[in-house]
Image (tube, rainbow, N blue to C red):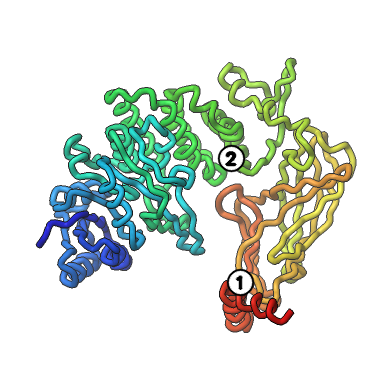
Amino acid sequence: MRTPDVTVTVIVYNDAERLTRAVDSVRRQTHANVEIVISDDHSTDETPDVARRLAAEDPRVRHLRLERNSGGCSVPRNRALETARAPYLMFLDSDDELPDDAVELLLAAHREREIDFAMGAVQRVRVDNGRRSTWMPHLVAERRTLGGIEADPRLLFEHLATSKMYARAFLDRHGLRFPEGIHYEDQLFSAQAYCLAKSFTIIPEPVYRWYVAPFAASEAASISNQRHKLTNVRDRVHVQHLIDAFLAESGHESLREDKDHKFLKHDFRMYAGDLPYRDEEWLSSFADIVTPYLDTLTPGAFARLPRAERVVIQLIRDQRLPEARLAARGLGHGVAPRQVTTDEQGRTYWGDHIPSSDRSRRELDISDLELETRPFPSAQFRHEITEITRGPGASVDLSIRTYDPALRLPVGPHRATLLIAPGRRRLRVPFRLSPVRPGTFEGHAHLDLAAAPLPFQGFAGVRHPLVRLEHQGLSHTGLLLAPLTFPSLTTQVPSHRLTVEPEGHGPGRLQVRWEPVGVTARVVRPVVRRVARPRVKRAARLLASALK
């Protein structure tokens, strides 16, 4: 057999169902001179049978089975690397795919000039709804060759080992292998590769298709989605310590602030979004794990974060855990705190008291949010459902409390509206908010979802009600937070099954789900989809133009 140009290692463990899809994506490559190594981490299902079948079908495929399970990605990758015959190497997980021209594109970058690795865009595909997006699109927006990570330290955010094609000589020269016995091995391996590479090329074309199951059952979730496990938190922090040690030992200490910022903005931020759903015991343990590491990070890394994220971090460091949970519900959504406190100098702080330490005052100072002076349409309020009662049919009665910590609304009753739009037209439900104390208003709304106007072809999807306030001719629309748990309501409305439920993730909103049934699902929607295809629309426009 002639020497392959590229070896693609497909690591697998108990994934017989998806292994064929992954391997076939390599077999379809437009550059066909590839070696495919299936590195099986001692699977106990039908994976070995599938791997042997694939190897029998195509001489380019080899099956490597480990004698015992390693519990991670590093060992199967390293064992395959030892036997790889090609001068260039790629890695693929069994639940993902390569686009058809991935090998050709990355290999062309290597042949264009001498580089240590080439990398391209990663296409993320949500398995629950099929939506596609590009991972870190701003980092791969244009073709460029860099003479080291110092040229763009933001690339530390793109820590996937699977989006790259490595020169075997580069890995061997530095003895670079995947660290065994730890999770989040990609983060350490990629940090080392970035720092050790003298030159690497970025191309904007997709070279990896990453299938993401964000709400998979706990036992089936990927390691990165097992954030509910405290061992997962410890693993992330442990690998950060290893990266820090490598930066210091390799003379790349100048990258420390960028790397710390990446940890806060990416790794910690994922846990922060989950905090509303964690109990007190978990929160306490989480704070005990992360706080000592947070204390080692550079001050500049914190200063680069949005204020809302800095607040959550500091509340965790101060052991103000219930408040951290409240603050986390507003991350990325402009949700106000329930209460603020102002000192003698006019500085505004999160919560009901002025922080005692200099660091806490610096991090919990939310004066820069300009809660008192920002334009009313962009003001920050906090709308919470305090009680949900099932009504007749598809209706629910909601008790709503609005917090106005900056006292933007004058004392007195205010008109408000619930808005929800499963189609182009909105359902509007007026209600009144009455003051109960300074900065706090309460009201009741009867939301009859059977009255929501649906498109002719029906609607399949999820919507979350919003609250609109009117003041001096201006309007403000904001999120409506719901209890994190409450009994789901399922009922029938014309041609649809309708469910009212907790959002179950993120800020925790009231979630309304429509599912077409009957004739609408079987006939109307398929017909409308066919008619709505771009070719049909273009033909209709041409015909209309010709008949004018």
Where is residue 519 shown, x and y percent of the image? 62, 84
Residue drawn where x is 33% and y is 33% of the image: 147
The residue that disc 1 covers is 515
In which quadrant of the rendered image does the C terminus lie?
Answer: bottom right
437 left or right of 457?
right
* Figure quadrant of residue 65: bottom left
Category of crowding for the residue at label 1, using alpha-carbon neighbours closer than 10 angstroms: few (below 14), some (14–19), many (at least 20): some
The residue that disc 2 covers is 328
Q: Amino acid at mark 1?
A: Glu
Where is residue 324 shown, x and y percent of the image? 58, 35
Earlier in the chain: of badge 1 and badge 2, it is: 2
Where is residue 310 shown, x and y percent of the image? 56, 30
Q: Is residue 297 above or below residue 488?
A: above
Q: Secondary structure at mark 1?
A: strand
Q: Is residue 526 above or below residue 184?
A: below
Q: Give me the C-alpha separation between circle 1 and circle 2.
A: 30 Å
In which quadrant of the rendered image does the N terminus lie?
Answer: bottom left
170 or 443: nearer the viewer = 170
181 or 208: nearer the viewer = 208
Residue drawn where x is 30% and y is 42% of the image: 185
Q: Is residue 205 above or below residue 23?
A: above
* Figure quadrant of residue 510: bottom right
* Figure quadrant of residue 309: top right
Residue drawn where x is 57% and y is 78% of the image: 530
Residue 285 visible in the picture: no
129 or 230: nearer the viewer = 129
Q: Is residue 16 above or below residue 438?
A: below
Mark 1 vs 2: CB contact within 8 A: no
Where is residue 523 shown, x and y percent of the image? 60, 83
User: Which numbered dot is residue 130?
Assistant: none
45 or 127: nearer the viewer = 127
415 left or right of 213?
right
